[in-house]
Image (spheres, grey):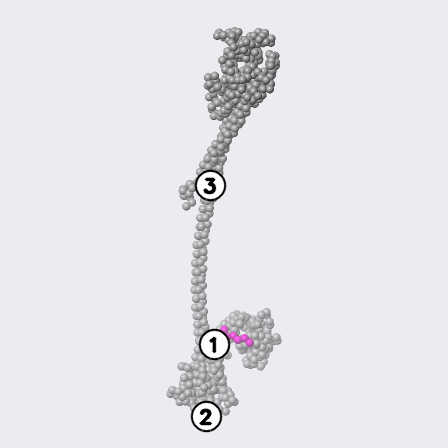
């Protein structure tokens, strides 16, 4: 089971999508703290404690990453993280609308733990979320 | 340039040269022939003349020899009788018509006159020593110390009047006799007139002294001593000759030679006088002769004849018209030469004319050729221009193609970008709407009336449909845009997976045929085709019970797959329409049918190099057949 205090970082810029994740977690009775970064830069700032951001310490046990982000895209974020010795081993799951093989390949190039296309329906989304957490749990 | 008058004249130089040369050579030949003829004639004339002079010389020598013979005869014989003398000279007289007289003239001293006359009368009774008196009458010779009477003379008949005549009284004869006595040699007189029966002709006398024999022993000595004065003269052998007859007799031995011969000797006065003129026997009237006539030809042959110690000059001249160059041969040469020259000139003229023609022809052809070459050059230039134009066009085309290609690439990129943007930027808000609608519906459960609840459901359905449309569009655009990856595909396994995922109703049986191949193909694309076709069959079967068959057969380098069903079928008029995008045969409200499926299938099949056909009719089920190429 997921440690109750283990923090999850969601990198997502769409408010409804953020709500969707929050709701899905709630519906799956997951109450772990969820940090939300609206851009890749913001997420990096939070992870490294740079700029106005307070460093997440300990680091989040899971990062849910959207790819289509302003300022710094998800792929760019992945490159930065994987190039950072302190951050490169973070567990990252891509959660995106894109079903493009291009994006899928690019993501797996940076050794992501899973690539999930956001399901259209909320129920499916919830199930997908549960699956992610169960997998993580099973690890 | 070749036709300028100057050059034209230059062209005729050979003609002028040939003509001049021809004329010169003709003249030269003419002169040569004439000269040669002259020479030949001159030689022939000289030879003939020499022959003539020679025979005359021989005759003269023979004549002189005759006199010497007579002298020897008298010297050898103490007594020569009249009959003996006649017999001795007769043969000579017969064979030599030029002999006027042959006589023996003894020297008789006064004291011996009577004895001499008496002896003479023994053979000729009327003999006496005579002399001519002042009237010309023959009288008995006066008393003189010595007499030189003609004792014998032959032929007697023509000379009887001189028999007994004392030659000492004839100055001319006496002079000759005395001269021969003085010299002891044969003497020839200058020319004398000879009269025979009133005919006067030219002649000459020859005298030879005869001495008494001395002692037989001393004879030789005295002869060796050569002193005739010391010997006593016995008498003289005398001959009178007619020059003309002698000459004619000599020339008888030669055939007529068309030569006139004049003999000149010294006259009594010492002048040169014509002794005899022989008229060539070829002359028609051989009598009249003019010396001037001989000068015409210019040919003359002169030689000296020797008679004892006297000389005759012989002048031979040809009969006019003979021994002259045959003018005809000269003229023949000249005519031939001129004719030949004329012919040659004409020939050369013809040649030049011909050459001119050829030259003109060559000029014409050359200019034609030049024209052709110019045309050709122009064509080459045109062609080069055309080539460069073509090259320019090609480059232009290439440029355009490049532009178009980059445009196409740009458009493809745009499309890709569009697809990408769509997949994220359209789907994300749509999902947001769907979620929000869901949450409203969930949160207000029981707080809103049934109509609002129904409207929220309709909203959800429309959003879902829009989502599917976007998904379909994305998928359609992805065909040919994504890299094709080939791999071994087990078709049976693939079909089973698809059927399983589609989960058809239990009583709708999907039967997968035998001999499904395992071959190299783009698994994703093939899967999409099959799942769309099978899905459609399930979706539009129209009944919960029935069959769906999937079959395959090999057709050359491709497989032909068939997906057929026993469903409601599709009317033929819609067969084309079903493959068009967004075309559905059902209402929009019915089911989640986007109308993209078959358009997508057709695009994939065509993209793979195959084709798809539909065989169906209303109520008779539908049969889709598509081909898929094998890959090595």
Note whether B278 is above or below B344 in the view shown. Answer: above
> For the point 49% across and 80% down, which residue is it?
A105
The part of the image, by quadrant, that contains residue A18 is bottom left
- Which residue matches tag 1? B474
Q: Residue at x 45, y 57 (%)?
A: B383
Q: Are marks 1 and 2 in contact (CB under 8 Å)?
A: no
Magenta residues, dominant SS class: loop
Dot 3 corresponds to which residue? B352
Place of residue B174 in the rendered image (x, y in percent of width and height, measured from the top left): 51, 14
Of residue B4 and residue A127, the one placed in the foreground of this image is B4
Q: Residues within 10 Å of mark 2 (few under 14, many from 20)?
A: few
Instruction: Kindly state the secondary structure of the residue where label 2 is placed.
Output: loop
Q: Are marks 1 and 2 on the same chain?
A: no
Q: Are marks 3 and 2 on the same chain?
A: no
Q: Residues within 10 Å of mark 1 (few under 14, many from 20)?
A: some
Disc assigned to residue A5: 2
The reply to whether the magenta stretch includes residue B103 is: no
User: Disc 1 on helix, strand or loop?
Assistant: helix
| Pointer 1 or 3: first along the chain | 3
Which residues are drawn in magenta? Answer: B480-487
The mark closer to the camera, 1 or 2, is: 2
B159, above or below A20, in the image = above
């Amino acid at each position: 089971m997921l440690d109750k205090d283990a923090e999850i970082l969601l990198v997502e810029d769409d408010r409804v999508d953020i709500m969707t994740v929050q709701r899905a977690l709630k519906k799956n009775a997951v109450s772990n703290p969820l940090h939300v970064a609206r851009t890749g830069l913001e997420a990096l700032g939070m992870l490294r404690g740079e700029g106005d951001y307070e460093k997440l310490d300990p680091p989040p046990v899971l990062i849910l990453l959207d790819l289509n982000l302003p300022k710094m895209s998800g792929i760019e974020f992945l490159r930065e993280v994987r190039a950072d010795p302190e951050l490169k081993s973070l567990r990252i799951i891509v959660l995106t609308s894109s079903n493009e093989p291009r994006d899928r390949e690019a993501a797996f190039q940076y050794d992501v733990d899973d690539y999930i296309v956001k399901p259209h329906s909320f129920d499916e989304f919830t199930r997908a979320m549960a699956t992610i957490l169960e997998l993580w749990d099973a690890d | 340039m070749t036709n300028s008058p100057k050059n034209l004249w230059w062209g005729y130089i050979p003609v002028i040269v040939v003509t001049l040369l021809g004329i010169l050579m003709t003249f030269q030949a003419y002169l040569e022939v004439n000269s040669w003829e002259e020479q030949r004639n001159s030689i022939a004339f000289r030879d003939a003349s020499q022959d003539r002079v020679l025979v005359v010389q021989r005759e003269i020598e023979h004549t002189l020899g005759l006199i010497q013979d007579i002298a020897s005869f008298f010297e050898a014989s103490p007594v020569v009788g009249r009959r003996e003398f006649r017999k001795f000279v007769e043969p000579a007289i017969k064979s030599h018509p030029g002999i006027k007289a042959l006589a023996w003239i003894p020297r008789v001293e006064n004291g011996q006159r009577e004895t001499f006359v008496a002896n003479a009368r023994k053979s000729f009774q009327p003999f006496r020593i005579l002399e001519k008196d002042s009237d010309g009458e023959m009288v008995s010779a006066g008393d003189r110390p010595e007499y030189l009477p003609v004792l014998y003379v032959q032929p007697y008949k023509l000379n009887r009047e001189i028999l007994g005549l004392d030659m000492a009284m004839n100055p001319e004869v006496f002079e000759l006799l005395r001269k021969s006595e003085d010299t002891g040699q044969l003497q020839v007189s200058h020319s004398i007139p000879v009269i025979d029966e009133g005919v006067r002709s030219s002649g000459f006398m020859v005298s030879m002294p005869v001495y008494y024999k001395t002692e037989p022993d001393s004879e030789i000595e005295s002869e060796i001593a050569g002193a005739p004065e010391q010997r006593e003269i016995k008498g003289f052998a005398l001959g009178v000759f007619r020059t003309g007859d002698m000459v004619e007799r000599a020339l008888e031995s030669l055939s007529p030679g068309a030569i006139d011969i004049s003999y000149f000797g010294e006259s009594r006065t010492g002048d040169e006088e014509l002794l005899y003129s022989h008229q060539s026997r070829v002359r028609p009237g051989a009598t009249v002769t003019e010396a001037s006539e001989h000068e015409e030809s210019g040919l003359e042959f002169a030689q000296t004849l020797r008679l004892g110690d006297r000389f005759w000059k012989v002048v031979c001249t040809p009969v006019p018209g003979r021994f002259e160059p045959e003018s005809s041969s000269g003229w023949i040469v000249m005519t031939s030469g001129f004719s030949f020259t004329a012919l040659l000139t004409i020939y050369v003229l013809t040649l030049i004319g011909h050459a001119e023609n050829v030259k003109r022809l060559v000029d014409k052809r050359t200019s034609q050729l030049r024209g052709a070459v110019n045309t050709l050059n122009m064509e080459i230039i045109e062609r080069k221009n055309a080539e460069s134009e073509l090259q320019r066009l090609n480059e232009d085309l290439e440029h355009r193609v490049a532009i178009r290609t980059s445009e196409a690439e740009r458009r493809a990129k745009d499309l890709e970008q569009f697809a990408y943007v769509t997949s994220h930027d359209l789907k994300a808000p749509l999902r947001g709407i769907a979620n929000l609608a869901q949450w409203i519906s969930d949160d207000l459960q029981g707080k809103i009336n049934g109509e609002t609840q129904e409207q929220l459901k309709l909203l959800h359905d429309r959003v879902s449909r829009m989502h599917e449309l976007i998904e379909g569009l994305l998928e359609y655009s992805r065909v040919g845009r994504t890299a094709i990856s080939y791999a071994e595909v087990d078709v049976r396994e693939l079909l089973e997976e698809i059927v399983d995922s589609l989960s058809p109703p239990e009583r709708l049986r999907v039967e997968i045929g035998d001999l499904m191949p395992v071959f190299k193909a783009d698994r994703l694309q093939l899967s999409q085709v099959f799942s769309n076709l099978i899905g459609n069959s399930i979706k539009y079967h129209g009944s919960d019970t029935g069959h769906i068959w999937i079959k395959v057969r090999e057709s050359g380098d491709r497989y032909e797959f068939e997906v057929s069903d026993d469903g409601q079928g599709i009317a033929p008029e819609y067969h084309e329409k079903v493959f068009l995008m967004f075309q559905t045969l059902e209402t929009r409200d019915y089911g989640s049918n986007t109308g993209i499926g078959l358009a997508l299938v057709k695009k994939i099949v065509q993209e793979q190099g195959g084709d798809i056909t539909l065989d169906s009719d209303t109520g008779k089920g539908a049969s889709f057949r598509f081909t898929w190429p094998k890959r090595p």
